[in-house]
Image (spheres, rainbow, N blue to C red):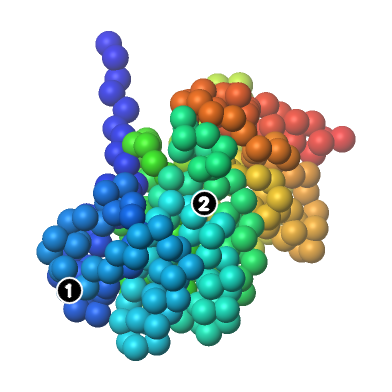
């Protein structure tokens, strides 16, 4: 008997939530650029044409306009592909939004290598390092559509700039319907005493699968969903190092400046423990389907399981 795994696209859920937010709050507006079908903002534009602003392929201008709207009391959601938002408008985000601590919500799609066949020019594998460098920004990497909806709502209801990272394809739904996203807090998805796997985004399902496989070998792995990279739950990392003595991080981003780097900093400063990082290698990737790329660049449950065993070896050394 074949078991069907429920999947859904985070960007689809974002489009749905955006319309609901528009219905609930007349100050919610949308700023986009030539990719409104892909970021799923079309429905908002049809329902609220007077609150929908399309600037074409002009990301720097988009961010400046969003800053102006926020300074005027609006709640602007700005959406394009992750690589364009962070790569083409870094200076405008830095000066116009971050330094002024304006209430702008940047929700990007097509993040990481999950853009697949679009190739390396469309793969934003440095975006978390860039956005986490802004002291005033909240940076969120949802695990699935359930967390996406809650993260977007949190952004709308929390003053300050947000960066929410979504991927292109449908992904596994792994969180329960009663799940509660909390800004700045990790969520424990599985208890374990031997080591801790800390994951974010599309590697949360892989972390859970790895923990299940490890359990069959008698290794009990705690699994944390660290969706909030800024603010960051240092206490959860310290507790993981103290309680389990070894940590594995898993993310679809370069090691530099992402989840693994944040965890390693806390461990180095607060509680020493071996840390193994499952992340993209130090280089750019090639074109291929998302599943092919996850395998090629060692971001699978088997890779997380292997990293866990390396961490345990270091723990016992």
Real-space Cα separation, disc 1 to disc 2, in angstroms: 28 Å
**Dot 2, how many residues are within 10 Å of its Cα: few (below 14), some (14-19), or many (20+)?**
many
Q: Is residue 152 visible?
A: no
Q: Which mark is residue 278?
A: none
Q: Secondary structure at mark 2?
A: helix
Residue furthest bottom in the image: 72
Name the residue at 72% across, 60% down. Answer: 266
Residue denoted by label 1: 50
Residue 18 vs residue 246: left or right? left
Residue furthest right in the image: 317
Quarter of the figure with the N terminus: top left
Task: Determine the image quadrant of residue 305.
Answer: top right
- The front one of 289 and 21 is 289
Q: Secondary structure at mark 1?
A: helix
Give the mark nearest the N terminus, 1 or 2: 1
Name the residue at 26% across, 57% down. Answer: 41
Is 255 placed above or below 152 here? above
Q: Which mark is residue 83?
A: 2
Q: Position of residue 97 (x, y in %)?
A: 50, 77
- The front one of 128 and 224 is 128
**Dot 1, how many residues are within 10 Å of its Cα: few (below 14), some (14-19), or many (20+)?**
few
Is 69 placed above or below 239 here? below
Marks 1 and 2 close (CB-CB < 8 Å): no
Q: Is residue 287 visible?
A: yes
Name the residue at 43% across, 79% down. Answer: 67
Name the residue at 30% across, 64% down. Answer: 54
């Amino acid at each position: 008997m074949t078991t069907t795994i429920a999947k859904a696209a985070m960007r689809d859920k974002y489009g749905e939530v955006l319309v609901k937010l528009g219905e609930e709050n007349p100050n919610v507006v949308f700023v986009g650029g030539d990719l409104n079908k892909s970021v799923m903002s079309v429905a908002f534009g049809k329902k609220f044409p007077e609150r929908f602003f399309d600037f074409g392929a002009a990301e720097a201008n988009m961010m400046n306009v969003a800053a102006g709207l926020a300074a005027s009391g609006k709640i602007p959601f700005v959406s394009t592909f992750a690589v364009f938002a962070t790569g083409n408008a870094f200076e405008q985000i830095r000066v116009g939004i971050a330094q002024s601590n304006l209430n702008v919500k940047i929700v990007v799609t097509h993040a990481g290598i999950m853009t697949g066949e679009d190739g390396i020019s469309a793969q934003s594998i440095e975006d978390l390092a860039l956005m986490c460098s802004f002291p005033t920004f909240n940076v969120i990497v949802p695990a699935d559509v359930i967390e996406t909806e809650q993260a977007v709502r949190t952004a709308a209801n929390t003053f300050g700039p947000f960066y929410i990272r979504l991927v292109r394809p449908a992904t596994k739904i792994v969180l329960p319907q009663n799940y509660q996203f909390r800004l700045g807090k990790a969520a424990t998805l599985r208890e374990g005493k031997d080591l801790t796997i800390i994951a974010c985004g599309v590697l949360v399902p892989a972390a859970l699968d790895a923990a299940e496989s490890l359990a069959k070998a008698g290794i009990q792995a705690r699994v944390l969903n660290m969706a909030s990279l800024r603010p960051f739950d240092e206490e959860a990392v310290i507790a993981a190092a103290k309680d389990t003595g070894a940590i594995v991080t898993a993310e679809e981003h370069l090691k530099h400046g992402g989840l693994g780097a944040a965890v390693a900093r806390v461990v180095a400063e607060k509680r020493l423990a071996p840390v193994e990082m499952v992340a993209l290698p130090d280089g750019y990737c090639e074109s291929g389907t998302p599943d092919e790329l996850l395998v090629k660049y060692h971001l699978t449950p088997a890779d997380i399981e292997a990293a866990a065993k390396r961490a345990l070896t270091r723990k016992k050394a």
